[in-house]
Image (cartoon, grey):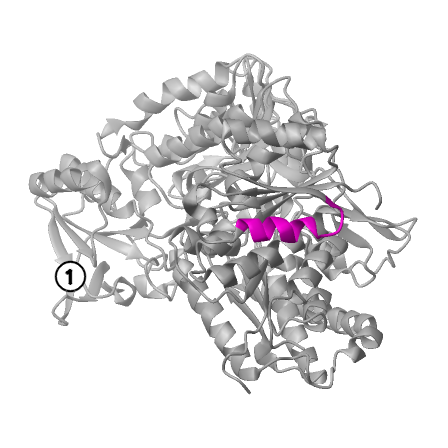
Amino acid sequence: MTNDFEPIIVGFLCNWCSYEGADAAGRARQCYPSNLRVIRVMCSGRVDPQFVFQAFKQGADGVLILGCHPGDCHYKDGNRQALKRYTLIKSMLDAFGIEQDRLRLDWISAAEQEKFVQVVSEMTERVRQLGPLMPRANPLKKLDSNRSTRIENDMRFLQRKHKKISTKARKIESTK
Amino acid sequence: MSTVRIGVFICECGPNIKNAVDLDGLSRFARGLDNVVVAERFALLCSLEGKDTLAKEIQRHRLTRVVIAACSPKEHEHTFKQVMAQAGLNSFLLQIANIREQCAWVISDKTRATQKAQAILEAAVNRVARHEPLEIREIACLPDVVVVGAGMAGISAALTLAQKDRKVHLVEKAPCIGGKVARYEDLFPNLECASCVLDPLLDAVLHHPNIQLWTLSEVKNVLGYFGNYTVEIITKARHVDLQTCIGCGACVEVCPVSVQNEYNEGLDTRKAVYLPYPGALPNLAAIDETHCLRWQSQDCESCQQACPFGSIDYQETDRNMSLKAGAVVIATGFDLFDVTKAPQYGYGKIDNIYTALEFERLVNANGPTQGKLILKDGRVPESIVLIHCVGSRTPRYHQHCSGVCCSYLFKFAHQIRKKIPDATITSLYTDMCLPGKEAQPFSDKIAQKTGLKKIRIKDPAAVTITQDHGRPRVTYTDACDASKSVVADMVVLAPAITGTKDASSLGTLFDIPLGGSGFFVEEQTSLAPVSTPIEGVFVAGCAQGPKEIQAAVSQGQAAAGKILSQLVPGQKRALEAMTAAVDTELCSGCKICLGLCPYKAIVFDDTQQVAGIEEVLCRGCGICAATCPSGAISARHFTDAQLGAEIESLARHTGRENRS
C-alpha cells in the first residue's frame, strides 16, 4: 500500500448545517484534503442507501454523510432517519466485504468549521490507509441483484423496530 | 436530450478563484463535456455587468440550462435564479458549482484545486442536464388568526393582530380571561396593582370589534396548513345568557352546592353557579355541570328563580365550532410543579405550607381571605419561610431554572412586610437568579426594606419539612454543610414552572413536539423563538418556556408580528416547489413513508391503496424519497437521477494517476 494514494471521498452534506459548515471552513480559508467531493442534499435524511452503494460502485473509496446535530435538524428528525439508515448500511457493508470505516456519519453544525476540517482530514487519512477499493475483486457486483430486496427487507425490519421503540418510549413518557 | 444546451459560466471572483484554479484549463475541460455549447470565464458574474452579460449569453446561445461555477449556492444562487428568470428560463434549470468556498479557498495546490474544480463542474453539468423546470405555486390565505389561551401572551397577540382586515378568535378554557396574572395582587418589578394594569387591557379585548372571544372553549381538532387552518373547538355550555347577565351574583347566593374553588387554588369554596373570583372578566356567571344538582338528576331551579334578568338557561348544550384561520398562536401558559410529588416538602399534609400561586391568592384583596395574610386557624403568622427552587434545578424533578421565582419571592417578602410589620421573613435559596435590568436592584431594595433573612442552602431538593407541635419545621443543609432547621408559622414554596397538563394533547393535535418539562418546542431556540416546526403555528408566553410577564407580552407581540408580515390580507403565499412526488404506478401501498414525514404531508388513498403528497405541507426534505422501498417517491430537484449523476461524476472522476 502506498502512502501517496489519493482516495476519493464522496460526501453528502445537508443544506442547513453541514454544507454551511463546509462553506464556513472555506470562508476561514482553512485548508483540508482535496479528496472530498461534496453533494448537497436538503437533509441527511435524503441519503438513500443506494446512493452510498452507487458511490462505492462507481469509484469512491470512502463515503461521508454529514448532517445537523441531533435535535437541530431543519426538518425535525431527518438526521435520525439518516442515523438509522447508516447503521443499516454499515451492517450491509460487512456483507459485501467493504470495510466499515469507508463510511462515516457525523454531525457538523454551520459553525463547526474546525470539526468539519477534522472529520474530512481523519476520513481521508483512514481511507488512505485502507487503500483503493476498486482494484480488489469487486464485491459490489453482488449489489445489483441483492440491493432492492435486501434494502427493502432491512428497511421494513428497522421500521418496525423503530415503531416499537417509539411507542414504548411514549408509554414511558406518559406514565411519568 | 438533443435539445439540451448547457452554458457554463466560470467566475473569477476577482483574485479569489482566478489565482487558485487554472480557469483556462477549466473552461477547456468544460467545453469537452456533454451538451455544453459554451463555456467562458468572467471577471465577476454577480456584478451588474456580469449579470447583464449572463442574461445576454443565455439568449445569444439559446441555452436551455446553465451552470455557474463560482461561489457557494448559499451566496448567489438566488441572484442567478433571478437572472435566469429575466432571460426567460425556469430558475430551476440552474446548477451552481461551488468552486470557491469548497475548492479555491481550501486547497493551496493549484493542480489539485483545478482537478477538484473539474470534478465539481462535471458533476454540475451532468446534474443540470437532468433538471426539470418547476413551478412555484401560490395559494390564497386567510388573514384571520386563532389564539389559544387568553393569558398575558395570548391577549398581547390578539390585540396586536386584531386590525381592520383581520379577525382574531381568542379561545380560552376558563370562563374568564387574563390567565394567572389576573389573579395576582401586585406585579414585579414596579409593584403596580395587577388589576389596575390589566383591566384596561382585558376591557379592550372584550370590546374589540375584531376579537371574537370563546370562553369555556378548548381545541378539539386541527386541520389544514399555513394559510388555511380549520380549528375545531368545543364550547362548553355556560347556561347563562351572555347578553343579559350582568354578573350581579344573585344566582350564586341561592345555589345550595358548595365545591372547591379552583380559581382560588382550592383555598375556599365556590357554588355550582359561580363567578370565578370578584373582578373576573367577562363579568358573567357560569354553571358548572359537573356539580350542579340538575345534572345529578335533581330538580333544583334556585338560580333561575333568583336571576332578576332571566339569564339562566338550563337547556343550553355544548357547541362544536369550526374556526377558519390562516395561522394559530398557542399561548396556553404554565402549571406549577406538583409538589405532592416531592413528599419531603410536606405539602398537602402539613398545614400552612403554600405554593406561590396559593400565596398570590392569599394576599389578593379578592382572594379567599380578602387579602388578610392569616394562618388556617385565623392567627397572624409571626414567621414565614420562603423556599426557592422547589422541584427545579435538579435532575430528580425538573432541570431547568424557572427564572422568575427569585424575583417574585422578593415581591412576596415586600407583601408580607406590608401586611405584617414585625414578622420574621426567611428565604432559603441555593443560587439567586436575578437577571436583567430590573430584578437585582428590585431585590436589593426589598431585602433592605424588609429585613429579609437570606440563608444559602446546599440543595433545595434535600429540604425536608416535618410537623413540630402543629407548625412546619424546615430542615436544610446550609452552605457550610451543617444540618440546621427552622420552625415557622407559614412556609411558601416556589415550585418549578412547567408546561400545562393538557399541553401534550394540544401538542399532538398541532403536531408540535414538547420538550423537557412540557414546554412547546420552538423552531429555533435563538433565532425563531416563537415559531414552531409547523408553519403558521406560533407559540408565545409560558407555553414556550418559563418567563416573566414582560417576556410573555413580548412573545405574544412577536408572534403577532410574524403573522402580520406573513399573512397580508389579499396576498398569496408561495409554496415550496421542491416537493416530493409519488409515482402511483410504482407505489406498493406499504405506508412506510407515512410515519416518517415530519410534516404529515403524505396522505394515503384507501381506495387506490397508494400514497400521495399534500404539496402545501411538503417542505422538500426528501426523507420519504430515501425511504420508499419501491422507488415510487421522488424528491423534486433532488431526484435519484439528478443526485445519481452527481455521484457518478464525482466518484469516478479522473485526475488521479494511481487509479487503474
Which residue does the numbered mark 1 point to in the structure image? B486
Q: Is residue B343 left or right of residue B486?
A: right
> Residue B652 appears at what percent x and percent y?
68, 67
Q: In the figure, B580 relative to B238: above or below?
A: below
Q: Nearer the viewer, residue B91 or B210?
A: B91
Q: Is residue B24 magenta?
A: yes
> Residue A89 appears at what percent x and percent y?
67, 73
> Residue A36 appears at what percent x and percent y?
54, 64
Q: Secondary structure at mark 1?
A: strand
In the image, what residue occupies the spot 49% across and 45% down?
A: B522
> Residue A175 appears at what percent x and percent y?
55, 64
Q: In the figure, B204 relative to A88: above or below?
A: above
Q: Is residue B552 left or right of residue B573?
A: left
* Magenta segment, prevailing SS (helix, strand or loop): helix
Q: Is residue A165 magenta?
A: no
Which quadrant holds residue B615? Answer: top right
Residue A17 in view: no
Q: Is residue B578 left or right of residue A39?
A: right
Q: In the figure, A71 relative to B275: above or below?
A: below
Q: Chain of mark 1?
A: B
Q: Residues within 10 Å of mark 1 (few under 14, many from 20)?
A: few
Q: Quadrant of the C terminus of chain B?
A: bottom right
In the image, what residue occupies the spot 72% across and 57% down?
A: B645
Q: Three-letter amino acid code at disc 1? A: Val
Q: Nearer the viewer, residue A24 or B416?
A: A24
Residue B44 in view: yes
Q: In the figure, A96 relative to B94: above or below?
A: below
Q: Nearer the viewer, residue A99 or B514?
A: A99
In the image, what residue occupies the spot 75% across and 32% down?
A: B62
- The stretch in magenta equals B23-36
Number of numbered discs on residues: 1
